[in-house]
Image (cartoon, rainbow, N blue to C red):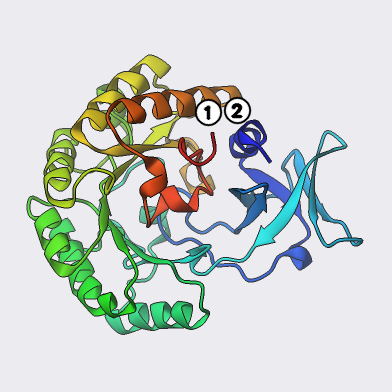
Amino acid sequence: MNAQIKAELISIGAIDIDPSILGRLTIPTAGPGAGGKAFFFKSGGHRVRLVVDEGSPLRAVKDNDNGEIVIIKGGKEFVRGTIEEELIHCPEQAYITMSERCIYDCKFCPVPKLNGKVKSSEELLALVEEAFKLGRMKGISLTSGVEVSPEKEVERAAELVKKLKKYNVPIGVSVYPTKASSRILKEAGASEVKYNVETMDRELYEKYCKKPPLDFTLECLKDAVKIFGKNNVFTNFIAGLGETDETIEENYEILAKMGVIPIIRAVGVHPLRFGELEAERPTAERLLKLAKMSRRILDKYGLDASKAKTMCLPCTGCDLNPHVDL
């Protein structure tokens, strides 16, 4: 699998596969993919996460001669590789959701509709311990919806980070920011943070992002870079909500100039959100174009997406990492 093939797989995002072929899976409980069944496919040093959907134009079968997974498109072999077992939510990381509920109502996210579980500290610590015992844990990542307030989630995350430092692996936290969140999380022992802008097209933000103002998140990202340093602060940037490539490039550079590494994420419309947003999943060509743009801008500002140790960038399953996949 090369960047072109991976971009094609991301642009489709789903695959038809016999469940008996799949190994141990975890169901994501946060973000746009919450509630769906998916697996990680690895080939040629590249990794992609694919949702299981029998209606997909892609089909996966097992080659019984060598055990490889063959992805078929249009009746022909497209790429072959292996299924990579998850630790928690992704390979090599314990990536855990604290609260599966959210008081906000971003139109691309199913979490407010799912009204899931709020895990206790004991449950969260037990999950990490279980992952650690498997012997493949290279990092811990914490994310969350907002059960009561962003301040409460930051407080919970910080207390967990303090208890998780004993594992001596990098710890990343992705939450809604607060004025003091970066300082609190850094002092607790977090290595990296992610505060998601989602989109920086102001019109689209007002239309789809039902959460605190964009300018507040930008100020918090700027503050995070001062506290955590370059290459340790990230943000998700959704592509496919109706923005132009020019808008993405202009705002991507604003973020990179601040020292933030944006992660361009192909939009996905969850069934629970049908009719609530107008979105078009980016084509492979657009994803490749945006990834090359990302690399050029990150290089310009001395940022390196391959240096991330937690959360989405080292996983690479849902996105093209400009310093890993290109």
Residue 196 image offset from top left, x and y in percent: 29, 43
Q: Position of residue 69 (x, y in %)?
A: 78, 55
Kindly identify which numbered label has been placed on residue 118.
Answer: none
Element assignment for label 2: helix
Crowdedness near tag 1: few (<14), some (14–19) or many (≥20) residues, C-alpha within 10 Å: many
Q: Is residue 318 above or below residue 264?
A: below
User: Where is mark 1, residue-wise?
Assistant: 287
Q: Is residue 101 left or right of residue 271?
A: left
Residue at (32, 64) in percent of width and height: 170
| Residue 262 in which image quadrant | top left
Q: Quadrant of residue 259?
A: top left
Q: Nearer the viewer, residue 2 or 25?
A: 2
Q: Amino acid at mark 1?
A: Leu
Which of 137/108 is in front?
137
Q: Which residue is mark 2?
A: 284
Q: Is residue 37 above or below residue 137?
A: above
Residue 52 visible, this angle: no
Residue 20 position, x and y percent, is 77, 67
Q: Quadrant of the N terminus?
A: top right
Q: At 83% from the left edge and 33% from the top edge, which residue is drawn?
A: 74
